[in-house]
Image (cartoon, grey):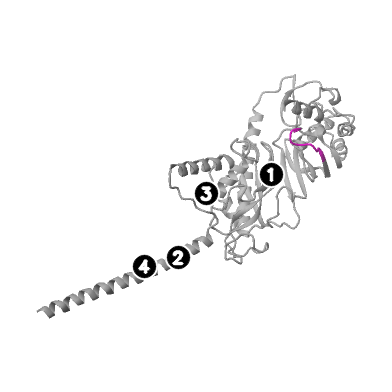
């Protein structure tokens, strides 16, 4: 009996030892698996996660999120930092009528830029905030101004995976020409962008590319109805802009931030289109240059309209470009913003890509939008036919607006704005 009990106890102890060894082996396997996964996570993640161990950490996190909201134009970014990335230039078009300009720094909504970043967030293409993404834009169009050739650049999520010598995923080692298997950025973004913004193409670019500083030339177009304007006089006057000049009398001066007002205009021309309305011919002024000042094109067009109406001489351009003779800008209203478009931005060796499917969808969308605007135009035309005749002291001007007939005050006889030097002296006295 005693021998039986001893043998049974021995079996139980042996069973416990066997189970203990099995558990110890399993723990070692789990520790090895945990170490392996931790190593993989450390290689794939692009940012460091901070643990919130107390109330101060939570408060710090909240402050960081709020700071991000302020720095990104009032919207929160959902950033895909653990994905591979590549530096991309996007070509964008937009109708500017409902936007408070392109840039979102003014904290006025909506802006074109805020809508683009909202779309990038929805599509999970963002890999960082503006600074981390090396975001840049070519032109900073004002409220109401449109574009068919705006260019921005930033890091975006990529389908391609490349590793450096340390086996870390990076977006900086992709060959720029490699596009096979890449995300169709045009298709993905256009699915979520509002109807008045569209991506026209994308291009891989090197990480030292800047949409602003790498731009070789910018081209603007300004549409207008010909009416009774003297196009020959306007074109002769416009040719005087060609070359490098000081355009401080043809812009809105920002003496606090801009100290050089010299710009080079390389092309100027006026052309007629095949579009007409009520017998009026639609024309366009095309201006091309390396860079433009604030409101420069609209100021140039305003003076050209005065020349086209016979209110100013062609020679007034020479006088306004001579800052020694005319150091102060005469007060005059700019041309309206709606007919102005940023036509194109030129870069060296940047070729934008658009897949055939995305291109077809884009054409269909633009054709449908065009038809919708034509329907609206037909309604406005019917309304115009129903209007009462104009009063005797009113006239319909060539820009399509009804204004009181007033006598023209020559530009050189008008009150002037402060000169650059006077503005700087005032700024310095405040400091």
- Measure how far apart labels 2 and 3 are at the Cα level: 29 Å
Camera-near label (1 vs 2) is: 2
Of badges 2 and 3, the one in the foreground is 2
Q: Nearer the viewer, mark 3 or mark 4?
A: 4
Q: Residue at x 80, y 34 (%)?
A: 250
Circle on res. 35: 2
Residue 59 position (above or below residue 351):
above
- CA–CA distance between discs 1 and 2? 53 Å
The Cα–Cα distance between marks 4 and 1, rounded to whole angstroms, is 63 Å
Say which of 418 and 270 sits in front: 418
Looking at the rendered structure, the number of numbered marks drawn on it comes to 4
Q: Quadrant of residue 206?
A: bottom right
The numbered dot on residue 27 is: 4
Quarter of the figure that contains the C terminus: top right
Q: Secondary structure at mark 4?
A: helix
User: Which residue does the numbered mark 3 point to in the structure image?
Assistant: 78
Residue at left offset 64%, top offset 50%: 134
* Residue 272 appears in the figure: yes
Foreground mark, 4 or 1, reads: 4
Which quadrant of the figure has residue 281?
top right
Give the mark nearer the N terminus: 1 vs 3: 3
Pinpoint residue 257: horizontal percent, then vertical percent: 74, 36
Q: Which stretch is magenta?
A: 254-262
- Looking at the image, is mark 4 or mark 2 earlier in the sequence? 4
Q: Quadrant of residue 145?
A: top right
- Marks 1/3: CA–CA distance: 27 Å
Instruction: Provide residue 340's location: percent of width, then percent of height.
Output: 72, 39
Give the answer, above or below, for where 63 lies relative to 184.
above
């Amino acid at each position: 009996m005693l021998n039986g009990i001893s043998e049974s106890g021995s079996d139980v102890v042996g069973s416990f030892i066997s189970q203990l060894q099995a558990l110890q082996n399993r723990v070692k396997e789990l520790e090895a698996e945990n170490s392996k996964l931790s190593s993989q996570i450390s290689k794939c993640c692009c940012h460091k996660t901070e643990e919130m161990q107390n109330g101060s950490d939570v408060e710090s996190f909240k402050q960081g999120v709020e700071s991000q909201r302020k720095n990104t134009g009032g919207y929160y970014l959902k950033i895909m930092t653990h994905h591979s990335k590549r530096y991309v230039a996007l070509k964008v078009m937009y109708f500017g009528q409902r936007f408070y300009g392109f840039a979102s720094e003014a904290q006025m909504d909506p802006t074109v830029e805020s809508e683009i970043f909202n779309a990038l967030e929805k599509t999970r293409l963002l890999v960082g905030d503006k600074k981390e993404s090396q975001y840049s834009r070519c032109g900073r169009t004002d409220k109401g101004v449109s574009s068919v050739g705006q260019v921005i650049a930033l890091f975006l999520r990529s389908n391609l995976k490349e590793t450096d010598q340390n086996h870390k995923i990076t977006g900086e080692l992709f060959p720029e020409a490699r596009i096979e298997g890449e995300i169709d950025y045009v298709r993905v973004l256009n699915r979520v962008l509002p109807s008045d913004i569209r991506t026209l193409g994308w291009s891989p670019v090197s990480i030292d590319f800047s949409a602003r500083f790498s731009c070789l030339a910018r081209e603007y177009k300004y549409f207008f109805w010909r009416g009774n304007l003297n196009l020959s006089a306007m074109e002769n006057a416009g040719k005087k802009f060609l070359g490098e000049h000081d355009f401080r009398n043809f812009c809105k001066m920002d003496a606090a931030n801009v100290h050089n007002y010299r710009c080079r205009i390389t092309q100027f021309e006026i052309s007629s289109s095949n579009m007409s309305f009520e017998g009026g011919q639609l024309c366009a002024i095309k201006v091309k240059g390396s860079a433009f000042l604030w409101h420069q094109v609209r100021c140039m067009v305003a003076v050209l309209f005065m020349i086209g109406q016979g209110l100013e001489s062609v020679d007034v351009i020479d006088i306004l470009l001579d800052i020694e003779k005319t150091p102060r800008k005469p007060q005059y209203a700019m041309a309206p913003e709606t007919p102005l478009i940023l036509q194109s931005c030129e870069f060296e060796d940047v070729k934008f890509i658009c897949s055939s499917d995305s291109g077809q969808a884009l054409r269909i969308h633009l054709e449908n939008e065009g038809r919708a605007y034509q329907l609206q135009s037909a309604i406005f035309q019917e309304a115009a036919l129903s209007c009462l005749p104009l009063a005797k002291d009113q006239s319909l001007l060539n820009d399509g607006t009804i204004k009181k007939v007033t006598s023209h005050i020559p530009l050189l006889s008008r009150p002037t704005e402060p000169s650059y030097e006077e503005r700087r002296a005032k700024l310095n006295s405040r400091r």
